[in-house]
């Protein structure tokens, strides 16, 4: 199995990502997915949970950038209260949006973690640039049909991932 599809870490929620974890891995910045990572895909604005967590990170010196495959309207609306660097229509797992995020954050790949709910976009994209990758359990089971197909493939990859950790 291609290790580019394996995350460095799997967590249930963004709240499982704390300063201790980031410091242990020498992480100074995060590239965050929005849909089903920070909020359910049909939630239009940042909720209290994601806003508090991002503020906690920023108040402790962690730089943050949003990178989403979603539309400009979606990303701009979500980012209204957060006021973060944000990249829309990213076409993850392409390298370009991740490089652009690194440029915004003024960080090196090894100082940056990618956090997202999808292996074929977030994890693959981050791993292609040797960033630390964190797979988050999707917030909502309600998803578009083509995402559900990818979830089936992700289950196969995750079985191999857990086998390799034994």
Image: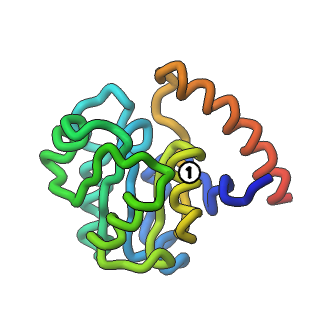
Q: Nearer the viewer, residue 57 or 117?
A: 117
> Residue at (33%, 26%) from the top-left corner?
42
Q: Is residue 23 visible?
A: no
Residue wearing tag 1: 135
> Residue at (39%, 64%) from the top-left corner?
30
Is residue 60 rendered to the left or right of residue 144? left
The location of residue 127, given as percent across then percent down, is 58, 63
> Residue at (24%, 42%) from the top-left corner?
75
Is residue 99 rendered to the left or right of residue 150? left
Quarter containing the C terminus: bottom right
Q: Nearer the viewer, residue 46 or 101?
A: 101
The location of residue 5, given as percent across then percent down, is 66, 53
Secondary structure at badge 1 equals strand
The location of residue 39, given as percent across then percent down, is 36, 37
Snapshot quadrant of residue 98: bottom left
Is residue 88 rendered to the left or right of residue 35? left
Q: Please tell me whether residue 15 is drawn above or below residue 89 in the rendered image.
A: below
Q: Please tell me whether residue 58 is drawn above or below residue 106 in the rendered image.
A: above
How many marks overall? Answer: 1
Is residue 46 rendered to the left or right of residue 134? left
Q: Which scheme is used to colour this image of the protein?
A: rainbow
Q: Residues within 10 Å of mark 1 (few under 14, many from 20)?
A: many
Q: Is residue 132 visible?
A: yes
Snapshot quadrant of residue 78: top left
The location of residue 148, given as percent across then percent down, is 58, 24
> Residue at (19%, 47%) from the top-left corner?
79
């Amino acid at each position: 199995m291609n290790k580019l599809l394996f995350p460095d870490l799997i967590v249930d929620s963004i709240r499982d990502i704390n300063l201790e974890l980031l410091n242990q891995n020498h992480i100074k910045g995060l590239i965050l997915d929005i849909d089903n990572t920070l909020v359910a895909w049909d939630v239009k604005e940042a909720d209290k949970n994601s806003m508090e967590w991002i503020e906690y990170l920023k108040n402790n010196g962690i730089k943050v950038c949003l990178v989403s495959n979603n539309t400009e309207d979606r990303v701009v609306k979500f980012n209204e209260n957060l006021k973060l660097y944000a990249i829309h229509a990213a076409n993850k797992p392409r390298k370009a949006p991740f490089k652009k995020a690194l440029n915004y954050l003024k960080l090196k790949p090894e100082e940056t973690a990618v956090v997202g709910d999808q292996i074929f976009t977030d994890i693959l994209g981050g791993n292609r640039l040797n960033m630390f990758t964190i797979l988050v359990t999707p917030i909502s089971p309600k998803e578009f049909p083509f995402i559900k197909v990818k979830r089936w493939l992700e289950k196969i990859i995750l079985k191999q991932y857990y086998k390799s950790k034994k």
